[in-house]
Image: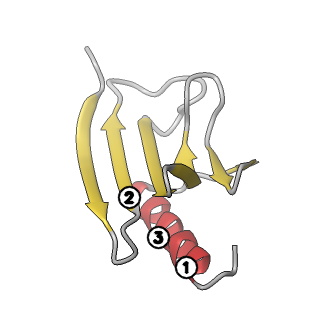
Amino acid sequence: MKAELIKHRKAIDEQDNTIEVKMWQLPQPTKDKPHGYKYSLVYIVDDVRVIGYDNAEGKGDHRHIRGKTKPYKFISLSKLAEDFYKDIDKYKRGEL
């Protein structure tokens, strides 16, 4: 059984930047995705990813901020989205 797409949203914000959120439910948890979800959340400015949260195969949960990769502690899908949008707000305020 394949992963089931449970959320996909793509939007353009007030600054003409792209926000895209994709979340999948896995048929069962895996070693690198023990929570049972696959996800990719990106904020793109001038065709460059400035913020990203994902758990690509074999890399575990992590986030990208202005080209730097840091581990991310996954708690829930709602917390993931909340953290992502908070980072976008910080970026817009010049705090990231």
Q: Are marks 3 and 2 in contact (CB under 8 Å)?
A: no
Q: Which of the numbered marks, if any, corresponds to residue 85?
A: 3
What colouring does the structure picture have? secondary structure
Q: Are marks 1 and 2 in contact (CB under 8 Å)?
A: no
Q: Quadrant of the C terminus?
A: bottom right
Mark 1 closeness class: few <14, some 14–19, many ≥20 residues within 10 Å: few
Element type at mark 3: helix
N-term-proximal mark, 1 vs 2: 2
* Residue 64 in the image, given as x and y percentages of width and height: 65, 50
Depth check, front residue: 68 or 55 = 68
**CA–CA distance in space, label 1 to label 2:** 13 Å
Image: 45 above or below 39 = below
Depth check, front residue: 80 or 9 = 9
Q: Type of residue at label 1? A: Lys
Residue with the mark numbered 1? 92
Horizontal placement of 36 versus 7: left or right?
right
Image: 59 above or below 89 = above
At horizontal 66% and vertical 29% (from top left) the residue drawn is: 59
Element type at mark 1: helix
Horizontal placement of 13 versus 62: left or right?
left
Residue with the mark numbered 2? 18
State the residue lying farthest toward the front. Answer: 46
At horizontal 25% and vertical 48% (from top left) the residue drawn is: 7
**CA–CA distance in space, label 3 to label 1:** 11 Å
In which image quadrant can residue 2 be found? top left
Image: 30 above or below 81 = above
